[in-house]
Image: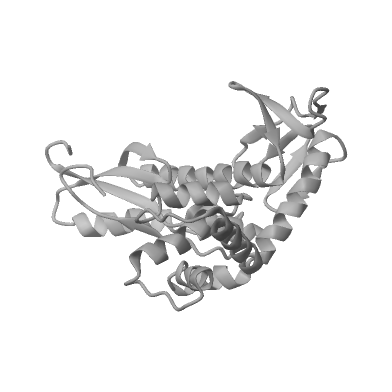
């Protein structure tokens, strides 16, 4: 609940991970869709179902949303099948594995630049393991770390190539607080994109705070801002939204967007 004299404003970055991924990969057709404010999910949904899908086709549009937002990190057919069944991006959709495989191919054919970016990321893993420093888009690979804008970094100092003597599996892996985890191209892309999305939001949060607003919480790609009840509530909200949509100097030309609302109670 908002304290007396204030409203709560949840402000959520729109499709931030997908926008950053398409920008980094050079998926220009989707960047243009975002820039022009077109529905980003309908073309993919239409290709998945083999017919024109509109916003009225709620479940089918949800499939498009799922594929656009969740397949950018090299998801396989089984993951696509399970995600559809859970209904994370819309009404639950039950499909067989063959359909999930076809949807995977649909995504990868449409997002060809993202697929190429995965290949590029695979080469970056080897550079992470050893080699001269390399600038990779807005980040710098150096000494088993990836340095980003603002001074933070991803630490892969435990990265190693592992051969399982029992199974013969060969893969890159690194240690996390939960133990060893495999590092493959889609996973590296996921790590980098989610980290950069967090930096976009964090920098916006610092600008909003500098304008005199109080940020009381964050949830994923969302800020929760206190807005004073002074008769200018909507103007305050728009000022904060403008900061969330501001193009970072280190991602020149990327179209960002957000949604925000005002209320006494935190809700979406």
In this figure, what is the number of numbered marks?
Answer: 0
Question: Residue 158 location in percent, x, y?
Answer: 74, 24
> If the image is split into quadrants, where does the N terminus sit?
top left
User: As displayed, is residue 84 above or below residue 191?
Assistant: below
Question: Residue 213 location in percent, x, y?
Answer: 30, 43
Relative placement, left or right, of 164 versus 153 is right
User: As displayed, is residue 74 above or below residue 234?
Assistant: above
- Return the residue nearer the eye: 187 or 193: 187
- Return the residue nearer the eye: 140 or 99: 99
Question: Residue 139 location in percent, x, y?
Answer: 69, 46
What residue is drawn where x is 73% and y is 44%?
140
Relative placement, left or right, of 14 versus 185 is left
What residue is drawn where x is 56% and y is 68%?
31
Asked if residue 4 shows in the view, the reply is yes
Question: Residue 125 location in percent, x, y?
Answer: 77, 41
Relative placement, left or right, of 244 versus 168 is left
């Amino acid at each position: 609940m908002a304290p007396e004299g204030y409203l709560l404003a949840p402000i959520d970055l729109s499709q931030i991970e997908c926008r950053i991924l398409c920008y980094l990969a050079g998926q220009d057709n989707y960047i243009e869709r975002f820039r022009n404010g077109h529905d980003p999910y309908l073309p993919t949904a239409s290709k998945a179902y083999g017919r024109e899908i509109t916003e009225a086709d709620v479940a089918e549009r949800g499939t498009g949303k799922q594929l656009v937002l969740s397949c950018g990190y090299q998801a396989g057919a089984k993951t696509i099948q399970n995600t559809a069944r859970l209904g994370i991006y819309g009404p639950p959709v039950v499909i067989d594995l063959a359909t999930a495989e076809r949807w995977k191919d649909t995504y990868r054919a449409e997002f060809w630049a993202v697929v190429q970016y995965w290949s590029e990321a695979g080469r970056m893993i080897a550079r992470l393991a050893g080699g001269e420093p390399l600038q990779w888009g807005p980040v710098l690979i150096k000494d088993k770390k990836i340095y980003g804008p603002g001074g933070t970094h991803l630490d892969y100092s435990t990265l190693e190539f592992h051969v399982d003597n029992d199974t013969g599996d060969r893969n890159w892996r690194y240690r996390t607080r939960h133990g060893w985890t495999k590092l493959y191209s889609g996973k590296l892309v996921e790590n980098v994109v989610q980290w950069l999305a967090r930096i976009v939001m964090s920098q916006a949060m610092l600008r909003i705070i500098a304008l005199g607003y109080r940020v009381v919480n964050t949830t994923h790609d969302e800020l929760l801002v206190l807005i004073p009840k002074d008769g200018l509530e909507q103007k305050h909200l728009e000022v904060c939204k403008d900061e969330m949509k501001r193009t970072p100097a280190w991602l020149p030309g990327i179209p960002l967007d957000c949604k925000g609302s005002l209320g006494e109670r935190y809700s979406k």
